[in-house]
Amino acid sequence: MRFFRTTLWLSVWLTLAACGGNTQVIHYQAPDSTVGDWYPIPADAPSSAVLAAPVIPRLVLPVSVDAPSEQDGTLLVSKMTDSLGSSSLRFNRETSTTWELVDIALTELGYTNLDKNRSKYRFVMTGKSQKSGLIAKLFSAKKDELFLLLIPQGAETLVVVEGVGDEIPDLNQSESILTQLHAHFQNQS
């Protein structure tokens, strides 16, 4: 009995699977009167129906391979100043791309990166005027360290300079770094 049920189930499943992708035309001729019809079919109902593969709506718009991507456009870097006088740079690139661009620019401009933390989008850097020797590092003050932070904002990235801890960075130093970065990217485009 179990073998019979399994075989029957398998044959029904294979039949349905084989017909699932193909268009099926079903013809139905309703008898004039039946005692067992619990759902009467109207007299003007069509005698055939076409069952095709279901149409599944796509949630993502198709993108052409030939269409230029947003990254192919020109790099736009704009300098902004808030009401407190703090400056920032806005890049029209995503954060990972901006990270690479800023890292290369800092190296070309001669800034010393003490640490790079990509998971926090943060560069720990010193000013250009500091020496990089052992004695200079021992006697240097922590307040000379600055954080260059990349803040993701959708398809754009904001670059700001912050001090260590909750300290406000020296505006001259932060302004100098951002001005040089801005000029560096303006000269490239």
Image: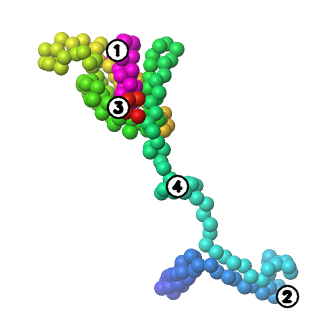
Whether residue 145 is in magenta: the answer is no
The answer to whether marks 4 and 3 mark residues whose Cβ atoms lie closer than 8 Å is no
Relative to 126, residue 58 above or below: below
N-term mark: 1 or 4: 4
N-term mark: 4 or 2: 2
The residue singled out by tag 4 in the image is 63
Q: Residues within 10 Å of mark 3 (few under 14, many from 20)?
A: some
Q: Which residues are magenta?
A: 163-185
The residue singled out by tag 1 in the image is 173
In this rendering, position of residue 109 left or right of residue 54: left
N-term mark: 2 or 1: 2
Whether residue 170 is in magenta: the answer is yes
The residue singled out by tag 2 in the image is 32
From the image, state whether disc 4 or disc 2 is nearer to you.
4
Q: Residues within 10 Å of mark 4 (few under 14, many from 20)?
A: few
In the rendered image, residue 82, in percent from the top left (x then y), is placed at 50, 17
